[in-house]
């Protein structure tokens, strides 16, 4: 008995093993493969790094962390060494000065972030862009945030950004302290935007004076506790910004329609146990990964730097070209924003009919831009200097009229500011020849050609290639006569009048080609491109119609409740641009249509009755757009709903109807009327060809079983 008792005492029981497991590390007593104590996995390193950075954001110190934090510090040092050498910061003293052009460009590329230095020469403690940065809820839909220099905050949603101290960069535009708030739209239909902290020259002030200045700047926005929190954890050389919930007529109007409300609202995600996530959710935004933001390639950064430096010394003409969805519009927005950092305005010529930037689709327009573009095209609809309504989404059937319209609009360019020309994404076949014609007609100083690995091969549009290539309506430098090529010096030879060239080639001085490799993210492909483009066109139309709403705090009113203008038949002429319509059916085509309000040279005072029809498509100024919501045959008047002011409507004497349609959600979302909704019917034969998008093979499969289809295909 005694021996058995001794043996039981020497042998550890199960409970004693459990106690040892609780005391000793789990890694040593696990049944898995043994590994050295203190070597953490990637997940554990990421989790530990997140905890350390959160503790640092809340006021903790790196020295107070666990010994295992040395692995994180070593890894961060290795990453910092692998980055390119930092650029020297500006040296002049005084208030925060704007960053140089090269520094601005580097913020758009996460691989070229510089490592700023503090005033004592010590490296600034940086916070990773994927980790929580210091944020604080101020209440009333406002959030206070601090950004270390060179760090960025990528987010999704819409908000209003105010720079309280330092400098910020959004989409290439520099926001300095004291500037009015800027509305930023980072929606999922395009690449997400990033708010970057710009390194600036620190003023020659003591730390006490800087803290006093920060307290004075924050006093109108925050309470005493918030100011103390900012002063305590403010990073050297950092920036302070306030994010607010955006309230505007445009946002409220788009949220009333189902087809556009989901674009501005965030996706419903499960609640996270994260203070930053909850704080940002109150103002309608959410942090996103940096890889989903806009990223420029090295060639794009170099092209931007060269174009900005040239535009500061003169007024060059810059033409952008490339395939569909390759990033021409994104590149032009970044270029415009960077130019606005140095000059007061930029001119913009829109030649892309399907995806316009500042107007509803189907227009060729010339605009002067004086404010930054911090969102997709449908968020910044502007009034152009000159605009012509082409009425179609492409020019496949009428190239000559398109060229004449571009010439007509281009004549209004005064060469007071740099001009940016956006072209169509049709760069194959006749589209390439049409692009050659545009380059010869507009004579740009710089041609920026964007290319990508996912697009088909496009010839490099050098100055020599344009000179030696025949366009659709212009001839090359080498003329062709009776099957032989003769050079330009032979133009002085005398030939019969019938054999001379009817349209000689215009004088083309040549251009500088800048090839840019596109790395912009795009969710479009050959299958969903038409769907995306249609959604963008509907959003642009809704953005234009939002101007009908009264300013805040007036309540929103549905479109059918607004009072339209009554226009007599004898006051305006009518023309359908995209099709030949019989005169007896012209009013059916105009009713419930999107119309361009134009001004032609002819006078309509001599006509007593109507409607007045035009025999051909005119090239005239378009002042705006509207909806013909009804026609009164008794009073012989059109009922037009438009945001144009009455003083401009007095000069309108022509209504142009094109293939641009009104978004279906406007007809379907008409609250108030009882019974049938106007212009909406269910008695419609969908089997008519062209009545539905699902025609061809899809309807063919419904009519026949799948087995019979397989037999026929075999």
Image (tube, grey):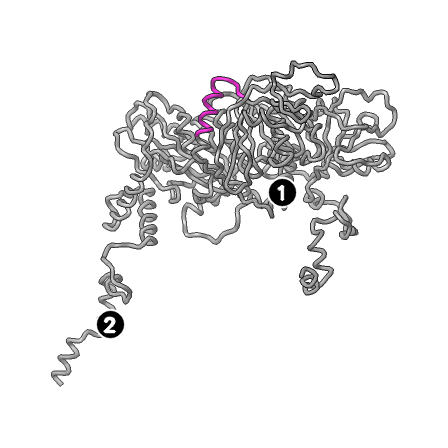
Residue 293 position within the rendered picture, expressed as x and y whole percent measured from the top left:
46, 40
Residue 96 position within the rendered picture, expressed as x and y whole percent measured from the top left:
37, 25
Near-viewer residue (493 or 543):
493
Quarter-of-image position of residue 55: top left
Judged from this view, the residue extending furthest toward the left is 2
Quarter of the image with the N terminus in it: bottom left
Count of labels in the image: 2
Marks 1 and 2, how far apart in space? Answer: 66 Å
Near-viewer residue (556 or 16):
16
Residue 196 position within the rendered picture, expressed as x and y whole percent measured from the top left:
42, 35
Near-viewer residue (502 or 535):
502
Compared to residue 88, the image places residue 376 above or below, namely: below
Looking at the image, residue 381 sits to the left or right of residue 515; the answer is right
Q: Secondary structure at mark 2?
A: helix
Kindly identify which residue carries mark 1. Answer: 535
Q: Secondary structure at mark 1?
A: helix
Instruction: Answer yes or no: is residue 291 visible.
Output: yes
Kindly identify which residue carries mark 2. Answer: 15
Instruction: Reply yes or no: does residue 589 show up in magenta.
Output: no
Query: Going 36% across and 30% down the picture, which residue do you hit?
Result: 199
Instruction: Reply yes or no: does residue 310 show up in magenta.
Output: yes
Residue interval drawn in magenta: 302-316
């Amino acid at each position: 008995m005694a021996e058995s008792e001794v043996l039981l005492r020497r042998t550890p029981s199960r409970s004693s093993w459990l106690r040892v497991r609780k005391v000793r590390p789990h890694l040593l007593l696990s049944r898995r493969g043994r590994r050295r104590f203190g070597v953490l996995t990637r997940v554990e390193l990421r989790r530990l790094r997140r905890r350390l950075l959160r503790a640092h954001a809340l006021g903790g110190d790196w020295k107070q962390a666990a010994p295992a934090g040395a692995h994180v510090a070593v890894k961060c040092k290795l990453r910092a060494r692998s980055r390119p050498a930092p650029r020297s910061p500006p040296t002049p003293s005084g208030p925060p000065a704007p960053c140089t052009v090269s520094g601005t460009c580097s913020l758009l590329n996460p691989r070229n972030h510089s490592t700023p230095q503090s005033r004592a020469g010590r490296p600034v403690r940086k916070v990773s862009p994927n980790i929580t940065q210091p944020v604080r809820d101020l209440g009333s839909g406002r959030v206070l945030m601090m950004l270390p220099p060179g760090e960025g905050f990528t987010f999704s949603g819409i908000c209003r950004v105010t720079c309280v101290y330092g400098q910020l960069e959004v989409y290439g535009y520099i926001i300095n302290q004291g500037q009015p708030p800027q509305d930023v739209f980072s929606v999922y239909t395009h690449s997400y935007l990033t708010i970057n902290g710009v390194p600036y020259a620190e003023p020659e002030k003591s730390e006490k004076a800087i803290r006093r200045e920060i307290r004075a700047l924050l006093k109108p926005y925050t309470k005493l506790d918030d100011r103390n929190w900012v002063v305590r954890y403010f990073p050297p050389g950092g920036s302070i910004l306030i994010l607010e919930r955006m309230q505007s007529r445009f946002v409220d109007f788009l949220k009333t329609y189902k087809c556009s409300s989901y674009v501005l609202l965030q996706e419903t995600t499960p609640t996270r146990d994260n203070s930053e996530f909850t704080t940002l959710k109150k103002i309608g935004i959410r942090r996103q990964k940096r890889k989903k933001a806009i990223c420029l390639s090295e060639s794009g950064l170099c092209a931007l730097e060269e174009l900005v430096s040239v535009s500061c010394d003169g007024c060059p003409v810059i033409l952008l070209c490339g395939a569909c969805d390759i990033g021409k519009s994104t590149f032009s927005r970044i270029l415009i924003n960077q130019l606005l950092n140095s000059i007061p305005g930029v001119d913009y010529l829109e030649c892309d009919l399907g995806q316009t930037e500042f107007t509803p689709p189907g227009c060729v327009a010339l605009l002067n831009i004086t404010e930054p573009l911090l969102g997709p095209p449908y968020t910044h609809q502007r009034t152009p200097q000159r605009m012509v309504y082409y009425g179609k989404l492409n020019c496949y059937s009428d190239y000559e009229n398109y060229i004449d319209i571009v010439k007509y609009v281009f004549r209004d360019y005064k060469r007071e500011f740099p001009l940016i020309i956006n072209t169509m994404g049709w760069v194959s076949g006749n589209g390439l020849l049409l692009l050659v014609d545009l380059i010869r007609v507009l004579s740009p100083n710089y041609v920026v050609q964007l290319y990508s690995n996912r697009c088909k091969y496009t010839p490099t549009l050098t100055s020599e290639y344009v000179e030696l290539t025949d366009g659709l309506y212009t001839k090359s430098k080498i003329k062709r006569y009776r099957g032989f090529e003769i050079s330009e010096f032979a133009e002085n030879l005398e030939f019969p009048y019938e054999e001379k060239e009817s349209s000689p080639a215009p004088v083309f001085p040549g251009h500088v080609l800048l090839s840019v490799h596109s790395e912009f993210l795009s969710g479009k492909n050959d299958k969903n491109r038409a769907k995306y483009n249609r959604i963008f066109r509907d959003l642009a139309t809704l953005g234009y119609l939002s101007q009908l709403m009264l300013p805040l705090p007036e309540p929103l009113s549905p479109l059918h409740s607004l009072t339209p203008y009554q226009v007599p038949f004898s006051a305006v002429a009518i023309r359908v641009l995209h099709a030949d319509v019989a005169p007896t059916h012209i009013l059916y085509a105009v009713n419930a249509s999107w119309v361009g309000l134009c001004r032609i040279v002819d006078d309509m005072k001599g006509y007593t009755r109507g409607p007045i029809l035009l025999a051909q498509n005119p090239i005239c100024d378009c002042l705006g757009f509207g909806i013909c919501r009804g026609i009164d045959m008794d009073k012989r008047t059109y009922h037009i709903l438009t945001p144009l002011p009455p003083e401009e409507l007095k000069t309108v004497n022509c209504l142009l109807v094109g293939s641009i349609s009104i978004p279906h959600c406007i007809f379907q979302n008409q609250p108030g009327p009882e019974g049938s909704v106007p212009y909406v019917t269910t008695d419609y034969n969908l089997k008519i060809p062209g009545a539905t998008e699902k025609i061809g093979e899809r309807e063919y499969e419904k009519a026949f079983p799948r087995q019979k289809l397989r037999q026929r295909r075999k």
